[in-house]
Every structure is written in C-alpha cells, then in structure tokens.
Amino acid sequence: MLAIFDEYHSAENAKHVRRTMVANAVNGFWNGQTPPIGFRTCTVPHARGKDRKKLEHDPETVDMVRYIFKTYREGTASGPIGVTGLAHHLNERGYRIRGKRFSIGTLHNILTNTAYIGYVIFNRRNSRTG
C-alpha cells in the first residue's frame, strides 16, 4: 500500500515540476541547465515566490562567440572556412572553451544553437533518447 502511495506522490510531484518549468520557459526564464557559451545567468527578482534566472551576455566569452560566427560567415584571409577548418583556426590562436580545445562537435553545437538568435527551446525531445 505504501509503495502505491509513493508512486502516486512521485507522479504528482513530477507533474507539478514539469508544469512549473514550462511556465518558467514561457515567461522567458532559464530553467537551470548550463547556459550556452557567451551567456551567463543572472538572478531576477520575481513578484511571487523564488527569484528566477534569465540569460545575459557573458563579457568574458561573448567576443569569442562573435568572432566564431564572423569567421565562419566571412572566412579567413585564405578564403572560406568550414567547421573543421574553424576548429583548427581557433585552436591555433589559443582560444579555449571551458579550458579545453575546440572540437568539431563543439563548434557545430555553437553554430546551430538557436539561443544565439534569441530563440531558446525548452522541452525538446531527443530522437535517440526519447
């Protein structure tokens, strides 16, 4: 009997948490995952309840992200550049992302992340993991 009650309570709790997280996303608040490179979270006072977090530009890394997009769009002095070439270009110049060298996958994630155009997606399903 206790196991059934615990299962019901867990399902109800999950439902309330999901509803709150969706409401936060609809209102433009950040739900706690690691922010994209070039952004950081700032605390915003909320009229009722706990303070919420929003994204803002990170002054330490925003210029690097701008350089990545500019170089990818315009190329280098030697001509157009792809993701692989851009990774080599950034690593040669000593750019690091969270202390690590740039990889092709990391750059692809940066270049395809919709947060950089002002469109943050929450509650998207991953086709591999469900």
Image (cartoon, rainbow, N blue to C red):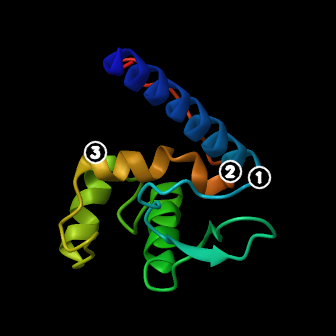
Which amino acid type corresponds to the residue marked 2 in the rendered image? Asn
Q: Position of residue 14 (x, y in %)?
A: 50, 32
Does 67 sit left or right of 78 as displayed? right
Mark 2, other Cα within 10 Å: few <14 / some 14–19 / many ≥20:
some
* Residue holding disc 3: 105
**Point 58% across, 29% down: residue:** 15
Does 121 sit left or right of 91 as displayed? right
Mark 3 or mark 1, earlier in chain: 1
SS class of the residue under badge 1? loop
* Residue holding disc 2: 24
Separation of residues labelled 3 and 1 (CA atoms): 31 Å
Is the C terminus in the top left, top right, bottom left or bottom right quadrant? top left
Foreground: 6 or 48? Answer: 6
Mark 3, other Cα within 10 Å: few <14 / some 14–19 / many ≥20:
few
Mark 2 or mark 3, earlier in chain: 2
Which amino acid type corresponds to the residue marked 3 in the rendered image? Gly
Is the N terminus in the top left, top right, bottom left or bottom right quadrant? top left
Q: Position of residue 82 (x, y in %)?
A: 36, 47
The image quadrant that residue 43 belongs to is: bottom right
The image quadrant that residue 85 belongs to is: bottom left
**Point 40% across, 69% down: residue:** 77
* Residue at the bottom extreme of this rendering: 59
* Residue holding disc 1: 27
Q: Is 80 rendered above or below residue 67?
A: above
Foreground: 99 or 90? Answer: 99
**Point 26% across, 48% down: residue:** 104
Q: Are marks 3 and 1 in contact (CB under 8 Å)?
A: no
Q: Evaluate whether residue 128 shows in this view.
A: no
Which amino acid type corresponds to the residue marked 1 in the rendered image? Asn
